[in-house]
Image (tube, rainbow, N blue to C red):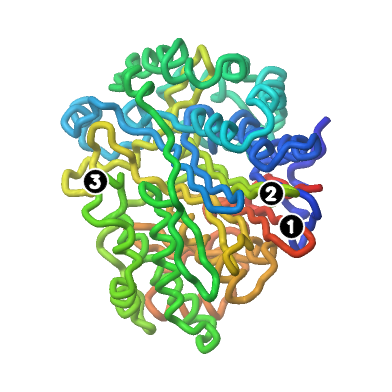
């Protein structure tokens, strides 16, 4: 039985402070996913069990954010920091010339050339193999039920189907499942239920080497795609050491390239050189916006598949480089960097913690909306469009190339205080992710704000390229006027605008956990 039936009530009833639990906690952007994760925690599963169960449900009930054809990234604390990069590569035959020949010179948004090898399925099994106490099959029941029996589309979910239907007008298989869906209707995905059952019975091998892989490739070829089964079978997730940077007496952990985690750390390092106690509200906001612009410009100039970067990420965090970037900020005038490539986003961020102190910060995505629009009808898979992060400009560090990892906006995070985690945090939002990280982490660390207060507060974001500054309704009018007077092109956005990201957080406290969820989503912060 569903714990929550009134989605609107959930979104509008977020309390002023984070909810506190003594044993375990989970937060996701959809209440049905949070419910599935909580159920696993209540059965005695650990944080990894809970977050995988929640993610499996998210791929069913929020396919406009993530799913079984997307990628996955995670940071796990088990007494030490562990990073996981579940990013897939472009096809081995996806040379710039081959892609241009099939796609043309326009930027890639959707379609077969936007599809990279999906990494999420391998990621779920990799996480469970290392930390799980329950099998994939044990954790998949809720996801299978929601896919086969259906679930009622909320205003949020049904609205997403309506909004994105024109984007996928040329994709008949996608339209057959989602194109006529509206709020209040029950969405059934029987083919997806069959896929999840197949994964539960046989593991990931069939997805990357067997009949599922063959179906993926056959569907892509029907649309003019370049991927082969050999591309799928070559996939492997990567364990990595997260990057760390100091900020006001804490250490912030982010994943290394191909993610933009280094850019989030660069922004925080630039900000650390300013004493916010001595800055008025306008100057503080101005400095944060300018630091974000620099971080995003440097990301697009340098961050890519590590094998294609001209310098290691440490160079972007080096003291001399940070000092130069900090000095480039004019306290009285906005500056707009010339370089920039806008990264739109969908994505789902979720976090979990258990009574043994196992902490998980995880983000999973099909990228923009439902992904590429290429839907594998036999298995109900919406294939990602992460390849739209590639550029068709040969001078770009992110130029399309064979077997290359695209630059990823996905950045799960943790904050350590005295060498132990104090906050598990992340958000969706494409380019907005680093911006939300800066704003929320600054509120929590600089101002000692309750996580829910920090997440609920009005936010801003800049659009890469033209650097328009979008500010949510509720921001101080004096600050808005002050930013405008310093040359920022400020555009007002609605209160709790979804484009500002969906952030969630778990703060580690002496008596347990304080968990917060974003009112911009339809999620729930639950615990024991």
- The answer to whether any part of residue 301 appears in the image is no
Instruction: Using the numbered discs, state the Cα–Cα distance from disc 3 to disc 2 in whole angstroms.
Output: 36 Å
Query: Dot 2: few (<14), some (14–19), or many (≥20) neighbours within 10 Å?
Result: many
* Image position, residue 362 (x, y; %): 56, 45
Of callouts 3 and 2, which one flags the residue occurring earlier in the amino acid sequence? Answer: 3
Horizontally, is 40 left or right of 440 in the view? Answer: right
The residue shown at (40%, 12%) is 214
The residue shown at (57%, 31%) is 129
Count how many numbered circles sit on residues in the image: 3
* Residues at circles 1 and 2 in contact by the CB criterion of under 8 Å: yes
Q: Residue 353's mark? A: 2
Looking at the picture, does residue 226 appear above or below residue 327? above
* Residues at circles 3 and 1 in contact by the CB criterion of under 8 Å: no
* Image position, residue 449 (x, y; %): 66, 71
Q: In which image quadrant can residue 144 be found?
A: top right
Q: Residue 308's mark? A: 3
Looking at the picture, does residue 431 appear above or below residue 119? below
Residue on which the image places disc 1: 513
Quadrant for the N terminus, please. Answer: top right
Q: Residue 499's mark? A: none
């Amino acid at each position: 039985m569903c714990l929550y039936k009134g989605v609107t009530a959930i979104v509008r009833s977020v309390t002023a402070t984070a909810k506190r639990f003594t044993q375990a906690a989970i937060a996701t952007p959809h209440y049905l996913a949070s419910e599935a994760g909580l159920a696993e925690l209540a059965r005695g599963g650990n944080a990894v069990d809970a977050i995988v169960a929640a993610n499996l449900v998210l791929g069913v009930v929020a396919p406009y954010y993530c799913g079984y054809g997307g990628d996955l990234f995670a940071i796990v604390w088990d007494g030490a920091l562990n990073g996981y990069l579940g990013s897939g590569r472009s096809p081995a035959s996806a040379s710039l010339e081959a892609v241009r020949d099939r796609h043309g010179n326009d930027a890639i948004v959707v379609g077969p050339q936007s599809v990279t090898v999906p990494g999420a399925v391998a990621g779920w099994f990799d996480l469970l193999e290392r930390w799980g106490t329950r099998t994939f099959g044990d954790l998949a029941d809720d996801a299978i039920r929601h896919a086969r029996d259906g679930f009622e589309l909320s205003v949020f979910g049904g609205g997403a189907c309506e909004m994105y239907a024109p984007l996928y007008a040329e994709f008949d298989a996608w339209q057959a499942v989602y194109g006529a869906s509206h709020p209040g209707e029950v969405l059934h995905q029987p083919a997806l239920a069959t896929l999840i059952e197949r994964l539960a019975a046989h593991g990931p091998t069939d997805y990357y080497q067997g009949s599922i892989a063959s179906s993926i490739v056959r569907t892509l070829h029907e649309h003019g795609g370049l991927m082969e089964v050999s591309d799928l079978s070559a996939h492997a997730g990567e364990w990595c050491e997260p990057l760390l940077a100091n900020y006001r007496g804490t250490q912030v952990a982010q994943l290394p390239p191909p993610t933009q985690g280094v850019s989030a750390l660069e922004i925080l390092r630039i900000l650390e050189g300013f004493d916010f106690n001595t800055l008025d509200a306008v100057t503080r906001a101005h400095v944060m916006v300018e630091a974000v612009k620099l971080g995003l410009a440097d990301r697009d100039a340098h961050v890519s598949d590590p094998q294609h970067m001209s310098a290691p990420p440490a160079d972007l965090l080096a003291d001399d480089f940070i000092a130069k970037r900090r000095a480039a900020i004019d306290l009285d005038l906005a500056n707009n960097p010339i370089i920039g490539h806008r990264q739109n986003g969908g994505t789902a961020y979720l976090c979990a913690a258990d009574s043994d102190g196992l902490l998980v910060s995880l983000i999973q995505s099909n990228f923009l909306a439902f992904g590429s629009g290429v839907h594998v009808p036999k298995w109900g898979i919406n294939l990602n469009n992460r390849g739209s992060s590639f550029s068709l400009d040969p001078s770009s560090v992110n130029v399309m190339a064979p077997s290359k990892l695209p630059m990823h906006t996905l950045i799960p995070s943790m904050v350590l205080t005295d060498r132990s985690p104090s906050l598990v945090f992340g958000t969706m939002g494409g380019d907005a992710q680093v911006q939300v990280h800066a704003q929320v982490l600054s509120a929590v660390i600089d101002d000692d704000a309750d996580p829910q207060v920090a997440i609920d507060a009005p936010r801003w974001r800049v659009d890469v390229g033209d650097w328009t500054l979008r500010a949510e309704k509720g921001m101080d009018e004096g600050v808005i006027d002050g930013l405008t007077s310093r040359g920022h092109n400020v555009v007002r956005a609605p209160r709790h605008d979804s484009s500002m990201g969906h952030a969630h957080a778990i703060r580690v406290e002496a008596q347990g956990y304080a968990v917060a969820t974003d009112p911009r989503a339809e999620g729930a912060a639950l615990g024991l």
